[in-house]
Every structure is written in structure tokens, then in C-alpha cells.
Image: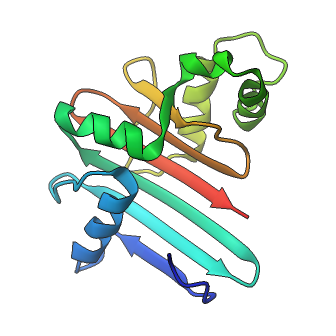
Amino acid sequence: MRPYDGIDYRYSNNDPEQEEAIGVIANILGFRPSATDLGYALNFYAGGSGIDDRLAIRCLYVASDWPSIARTLRLKRVSEVSSDPDWEEAFRWLIDAEDIEKSLEIHSHRFINNKKLEFQDIADERWEVFFSNESDVNSWCVVWRNNTHLNYVSFDQG
């Protein structure tokens, strides 16, 4: 549990000391990434106006890390969203695809590219895309990955 103290906690890969941030990232992702090719911007706030967390990470990973990552983040492929009609409605609202017939993947790429930070990879058909189960406009997490790199963006407000 973190303090509800009204302090904005920020971590960036530009900070001289990164060990604490890497520990935080390990707790978020479910595995400890290497400092090699690691980019991140983490902003945590909990105070009188509620919670406002905005997190972005780009890191190397290996295939054996993936099961832990997927379990920790409760990830589902975009193609799985339609199996839950209630979530699909909230998901379409999140990615601004409520009344549009194009594939959810195309809208997911656009959503990611609008939310990602500069150090993260552009999402397109070369990347597998996953969202945390039941992501919605108030709390969401998206991961896009290839065989070597993982990108993560999340938002939680309440």
C-alpha cells in the first residue's frame, strides 16, 4: 500500500539513481527488467483529490518472462474483448470506437499512439497488443510487444 499523502512521486530513466524505480517497475510488470535499453516515466499521486497514476515503460524481456507479465497485469488480447459484451462496450468507449466498424486492433493502435510517450515504440500491425482485463476510461493498461521489447502505458484515476 502506498501513502495517501498528496505528494507526486515521479521516476524517470533520466534520474541518476534508478534502482528504486527498477524495483517499482518489477512490482508493476511482474518481472525485473534489465537497466539495458530501459525507458520509463512513472507518476504516482494519491491525495485529497484521489488517485492519479500515469505510467509508461519500455524494456527488454525474454519469452520466459511473458507468463508472469500477462498474469500480473491480467492481460487479454484485443481479439478477446468481444467475448465479454459488457467489457466490449466500455472498451470501445475507451478507444473511441463506439460506432465504428473497423477492427478493434486498428483503433487500439491509434489509441496507443496517442497515449504513448516519445521513448516508446509506435504501435502497428507488427506488435501484439494486450489490454488489462476490463480496462475502461477510468483505469486502463495497454501492453504492446514484439519478440524482444515490451511497451506499457497505464492510467488510473479515481
The x, y position of residue 25, in whole percent, is: 34, 61
Q: Is residue 86 left or right of residue 41?
A: right
Q: Residue at x 49, y 48 (%)?
A: 153
Q: Is residue 151 left or right of residue 3?
A: left
* Quarter in which the C terminus is drawn: bottom right
The x, y position of residue 16, in whole percent, is: 23, 80
Q: Nearer the viewer, residue 18 or 158?
A: 158
Above or below residue 65? Residue 15 is below
Q: Nearer the viewer, residue 133 or 115?
A: 133
Q: Residue at x 60, y 89 (%)?
A: 5
Figure quadrant of residue 28: bottom left
The x, y position of residue 65, in whole percent, is: 22, 40
Above or below residue 44? Residue 68 is above
Above or below residue 110? Residue 32 is below
Figure quadrant of residue 78: top right
Task: Report whether residue 13 is seen.
Answer: no
Q: Residue at x 39, y 40 (%)?
A: 71
Figure quadrant of residue 106: top right
